[in-house]
């Protein structure tokens, strides 16, 4: 099912145009992967008390949380909050398919999220392999497709 661009918000259209511009420059990059395999995520409710984490450390905050909480799913992609002039590479969590963002907690309701859900096992393997928190989308498309959680529903644009 194709996304009807007329139903998207101004910020959603901006994010997609930004991804498409980079896809043309880097056909094997993260942006091209997200356009073929990514989807929109719906913001959830307020982050649970005590979960607010280190600002500007979204990959660490979410990778650490997903390995500690079975109900959380790790997501990575592009996000754009009110006041940001362009989308940024970002990580967030989902619970029951709703965004739980420990890094941008106070902006979650005013943020759009577009990305993929990665298997917790893939996050754990990367952490053991590289011994640090880092983005996961800088790998080959074939490797990334093996990491996508089966619950991700592809909605091509």
Image (spheres, rainbow, N blue to C red):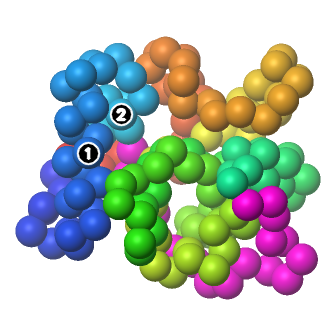
Residue at 27% x, 32% y is 22
Horizontal and vertical percent for residue 104? 63, 68
Q: Magenta stretch: residue 54 in it?
A: yes
The residue that label 2 is drawn on is 31
Residues at circles 2 and 1 in contact by the CB criterion of under 8 Å: yes
Q: Residue at x 67, y 39 (%)?
A: 119
Query: Which is the main secondary structure of the residues drawn in magenta?
Result: loop
Q: Residue, x 20% and y 48% (percent of image)? A: 17
80 lies left or right of 117: left
Q: Secondary structure at mark 1?
A: helix
Q: Is residue 39 above or below residue 4?
A: above
The x and y percentages for residue 23 are: 26, 29
Residue count near mark 1 (Cα–Cα under 10 Å), binned few <14, some 14–19, many ≥20: some
Residue 18 is situated, as x and y percent measured from the top left of the image, at: 26, 45
Residue 71 visible, this orientation:
no
Which secondary structure lies at badge 2?
A: helix
Q: Which residue is mark 1?
A: 18
Front-most of residues 20 and 146: 20
Q: Is residue 38 left or right of residue 55?
A: left
Q: Which residues are magenta?
A: 38-55
Q: Above or below — where is 77 with respect to 48?
A: above
Residue 13 magenta: no
Residue found 44% across the figure and 20% down from its top: 141
Q: Is residue 1 left or right of residue 40?
A: left
């Amino acid at each position: 099912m194709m996304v009807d661009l007329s139903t998207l918000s101004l910020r959603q259209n901006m994010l997609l145009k930004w991804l498409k511009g980079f896809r043309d420059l880097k056909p094997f990059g993260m942006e091209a992967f997200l356009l073929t395999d990514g989807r929109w995520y719906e913001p959830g409710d307020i982050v649970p008390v005590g979960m607010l984490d280190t600002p500007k450390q979204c990959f660490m905050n979410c990778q650490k949380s997903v390995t500690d909480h079975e109900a959380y799913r790790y997501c990575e992609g592009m996000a754009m909050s009110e006041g940001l002039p362009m989308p940024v590479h970002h990580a967030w969590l989902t619970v029951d398919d709703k965004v739980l963002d420990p890094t941008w907690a106070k902006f979650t309701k005013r943020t759009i999220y577009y990305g993929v859900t990665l298997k917790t096992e893939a996050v754990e393997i990367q952490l053991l392999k590289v011994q640090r928190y880092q983005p996961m989308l800088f790998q080959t498309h074939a490797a990334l497709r093996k990491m996508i959680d089966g619950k991700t529903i592809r909605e091509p644009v």
